[in-house]
Amino acid sequence: MGKDSEYYKDKRKHQIKRLRELLAVSPQFVRDFIYDKEMTAQTSTLISYSYDILTFLRYLQNSNPTFENYTTKDFKITELEALNSLDIIEYQHFLEFSDIEGEKHENNKKSISRKLSALRGLFKYHLEHENISSNPMALVKMPKIKKDKNIIRMNNNEVQAILEAVDKGNEQITERQRRYLDKTKQRDLAILTLMLGTGIRVSECAGLDLADVDLKANTITIVRKGGGQDILYFNYEIHNVLEDYITGERSFIIPADGHTDALFFSMQNKRISVDAIENLVKKYSKLVVKNKKITPHKLRSTYGTALYRSTGDIRLVADVLGHENINTTIDYYAAIEDEHKQRAANAVKYNNKE
């Protein structure tokens, strides 16, 4: 149950295994940096750091003749210290776009900034520990990321339409598609209603076990992105769709080995994956919300926006959504303040004739 479930135990084991695989091909100075971060960072974050640094080392292997015969373990921090800001800027351009066979990719500014932050942290660590005397990234400007106030979310009509699409489809779907949708109608309605009514992340939804649902107290026990456990309350609309699914479709499923505890199942009778939830959200939203690209995170945005509009309590929104830093919530829902200002523009009129 919760973070002690077999699902999360297996997930942690897989992450630890993946991190060890990356560290096994990393030079000692990278391992030292990652080990230093172990007490303060999640394993998933350490995996990202390791992968991003290894990407940089492989870039040097392919682009710098000095390192063409190196393995990733051969690099020394003093050799990286000899690089200059132009070398890092060229790498930045490589991250932005490459059509070289085997290295085809395209990253936006946010992705580039995240990848460069691992390098920035690496050099900072070794500078502080006096393993190097200069920082090649000191003069490199990080990509400027513009905060977008136009966050995509659904209005009440669109929410009702997407839930109705689960129940009835729409006039454009074929009879074959309708029969397919009917097989998972209760599951899909439960997933969408739960996400729209609690704001849980797609990973939190996929990780739910049957034992995490308490229909007497109307609560779910979830595991947050950082690994902490939390209990959220839900209303009777969610209660009803969960109960219908649990006593209906789910009761007829014979789970695959190792998936017995899962709340939501795939068509293969295994725990539903994050990708599968993303696909079902996309499938139903395309039927009725054609002018917006709706993802599970947009369902979360929709809930957070509705909660803030209803309560005006940004701290409550941050707590329910599991934001560790309230500034994340403030930035995210700043657009709502524009609505307040728009209402203010029409609130006072001096030229009304009585």
Image: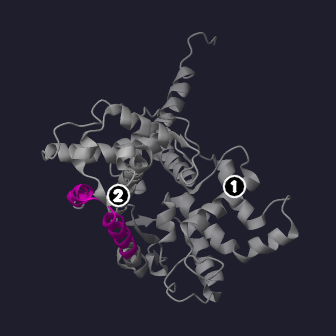
Q: Is residue 257 magenta?
A: no
Task: Point out residue 58 in the picture as x, y percentages from the top left corner.
Answer: 41, 52
Task: Point out residue 28 in the picture as x, y percentages from the top left corner.
Answer: 23, 59
Query: What is the crowding at mark 1: few (fewer than 14 residues within 10 Å), some, or many (at least 20)?
Result: many
Task: Point out residue 170 in the picture as x, y percentages from the top left corner.
Answer: 81, 59
Query: What is the crowding at mark 2: few (fewer than 14 residues within 10 Å), some, or many (at least 20)?
Result: many
Please state which of residues 130 and 156 is positioned toward the viewer in this rendering: 130
Q: Is residue 110 left or right of residue 288?
A: left
Quadrant of the frame with the N terminus: bottom left
Q: Secondary structure at mark 2?
A: helix
- Kindly report the secondary structure that dominates the magenta region of the rendered protein: helix
Please state which of residues 203 and 242 is positioned toward the viewer in this rendering: 203
Residue farthest to the left, as pictured: 130
Residue placed under numbered mark 1 in the picture: 285
Please state which of residues 210 and 66 is positioned toward the viewer in this rendering: 66
In magenta, the rendered stretch is 13-37
**Residue at the image point whose x is 53% and y is 78% from the top:** 263
Q: Secondary structure at mark 1?
A: helix
Q: Amino acid type of disc 1?
A: Ser
Residue 236 in sight? no
Above or below, comparing residue 308 to residue 335 in the picture = below
Q: Is residue 35 magenta?
A: yes
Q: Is residue 205 left or right of residue 229?
A: right
Residue 188 in sight? yes
Residue placed under numbered mark 2 in the picture: 72
Q: Which mark is residue 9?
A: none
